[in-house]
Image: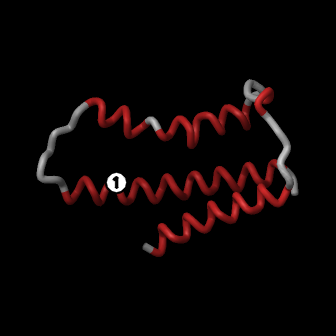
Amino acid sequence: MSDSVLRILYFVGVIAQSAIRVVYTKQHKQKGTKFDRQVELDGILGALPSLGMLIVPLLYVLTSWLRSADYRLPTRAGWRGGLRCLDVVAMEVAR
Protein backbone atom coordinates (compact mmCIF):
# COMPACT_ATOMS: atom_id res chain seq x y z
CA MET A 1 0.00 0.00 0.00
CA SER A 2 1.24 3.43 -0.88
CA ASP A 3 2.41 5.78 1.86
CA SER A 4 0.26 8.54 0.39
CA VAL A 5 -2.91 6.49 0.97
CA LEU A 6 -1.95 5.96 4.61
CA ARG A 7 -1.21 9.66 5.02
CA ILE A 8 -4.58 10.57 3.56
CA LEU A 9 -6.26 8.06 5.87
CA TYR A 10 -4.46 9.61 8.84
CA PHE A 11 -5.60 13.13 8.01
CA VAL A 12 -9.18 11.99 7.38
CA GLY A 13 -9.11 10.51 10.87
CA VAL A 14 -7.67 13.71 12.33
CA ILE A 15 -10.40 15.78 10.69
CA ALA A 16 -13.10 13.43 11.97
CA GLN A 17 -11.66 13.51 15.49
CA SER A 18 -11.47 17.29 15.40
CA ALA A 19 -15.10 17.53 14.29
CA ILE A 20 -16.15 15.29 17.16
CA ARG A 21 -14.12 17.38 19.60
CA VAL A 22 -15.80 20.59 18.36
CA VAL A 23 -19.26 19.11 18.96
CA TYR A 24 -18.44 18.02 22.51
CA THR A 25 -16.72 21.32 23.29
CA LYS A 26 -19.80 23.27 22.18
CA GLN A 27 -22.04 21.05 24.30
CA HIS A 28 -19.77 21.55 27.30
CA LYS A 29 -19.77 25.34 26.89
CA GLN A 30 -23.57 25.43 26.58
CA LYS A 31 -24.01 23.47 29.80
CA GLY A 32 -21.70 25.77 31.66
CA THR A 33 -19.95 24.95 34.89
CA LYS A 34 -20.33 25.88 38.49
CA PHE A 35 -17.22 28.03 38.32
CA ASP A 36 -16.96 30.15 35.18
CA ARG A 37 -13.37 31.26 35.52
CA GLN A 38 -11.70 31.49 32.14
CA VAL A 39 -7.95 31.64 32.51
CA GLU A 40 -5.68 32.46 29.58
CA LEU A 41 -3.61 29.39 30.43
CA ASP A 42 -6.66 27.18 29.79
CA GLY A 43 -6.75 28.24 26.15
CA ILE A 44 -3.04 27.65 25.72
CA LEU A 45 -3.12 24.22 27.35
CA GLY A 46 -6.25 23.33 25.38
CA ALA A 47 -4.52 24.12 22.09
CA LEU A 48 -1.28 22.33 22.98
CA PRO A 49 -2.40 18.85 21.84
CA SER A 50 -2.95 20.21 18.34
CA LEU A 51 0.82 20.63 18.10
CA GLY A 52 1.40 16.89 18.26
CA MET A 53 -1.78 15.80 16.52
CA LEU A 54 -1.82 18.14 13.55
CA ILE A 55 1.10 20.53 13.16
CA VAL A 56 3.99 18.04 13.43
CA PRO A 57 2.34 15.50 11.07
CA LEU A 58 1.65 18.30 8.59
CA LEU A 59 5.29 19.35 8.74
CA TYR A 60 6.31 15.75 8.12
CA VAL A 61 4.02 15.30 5.12
CA LEU A 62 4.52 18.68 3.48
CA THR A 63 8.26 19.27 4.07
CA SER A 64 11.46 17.25 4.19
CA TRP A 65 12.42 18.85 7.49
CA LEU A 66 11.67 15.73 9.59
CA ARG A 67 12.93 13.10 7.11
CA SER A 68 15.96 12.42 9.31
CA ALA A 69 13.60 10.90 11.89
CA ASP A 70 11.91 8.69 9.29
CA TYR A 71 12.00 4.92 9.56
CA ARG A 72 10.25 2.15 7.68
CA LEU A 73 7.52 0.06 9.23
CA PRO A 74 5.85 -2.97 7.72
CA THR A 75 2.83 -2.06 5.60
CA ARG A 76 0.55 -3.95 7.97
CA ALA A 77 1.48 -1.49 10.74
CA GLY A 78 0.07 1.36 8.68
CA TRP A 79 -3.14 -0.53 8.04
CA ARG A 80 -3.50 -1.46 11.71
CA GLY A 81 -2.97 2.16 12.73
CA GLY A 82 -5.52 3.37 10.20
CA LEU A 83 -8.08 0.80 11.28
CA ARG A 84 -7.49 1.69 14.93
CA CYS A 85 -8.04 5.37 14.12
CA LEU A 86 -11.33 4.54 12.38
CA ASP A 87 -12.30 2.34 15.33
CA VAL A 88 -11.79 5.20 17.77
CA VAL A 89 -13.82 7.56 15.59
CA ALA A 90 -16.63 4.99 15.36
CA MET A 91 -16.66 4.55 19.15
CA GLU A 92 -16.89 8.31 19.68
CA VAL A 93 -19.73 8.66 17.19
CA ALA A 94 -21.61 5.76 18.79
CA ARG A 95 -21.31 7.33 22.23
Residue 53 locus on image (x, y percent): 56, 43
Task: Residue at 69% x, 65% y: name it.
Answer: 83
Nearest the viewer among 27 and 82 is 82
- The quadrant of the image that shows the C terminus is bottom left
What amino acid type is highlighted by mark number 1?
A: Thr
Secondary element under disc 1, as helix, strand or loop, is: helix
On the image, the x and y values in percent for residue 43 come to 33, 35
Q: Is residue 54 left or right of residue 42?
A: right
Please give left or right for residue 49 compared with residue 76 in the image.
Answer: left
Mark 1: give few (<14), some (14-19) or many (20+) Cα within 10 Å: few
Quarter of the image that includes the N terminus: bottom right
Q: Residue at x 12, y 52 (%)?
A: 34
- 4 versus 82 height, above or below: above
User: How far from the left and from the top, in percent, is residue 46?
Assistant: 38, 40
How many discs appear? 1
Q: Residue at x 67, y 52 (%)?
A: 10
Question: In terms of image quadrants, where is residue 23?
Answer: bottom left
Q: Disc 1 marks which residue?
A: 25
Front position in the image: 68 or 93: 68
Q: Position of residue 2 (x, y in %)?
A: 86, 52
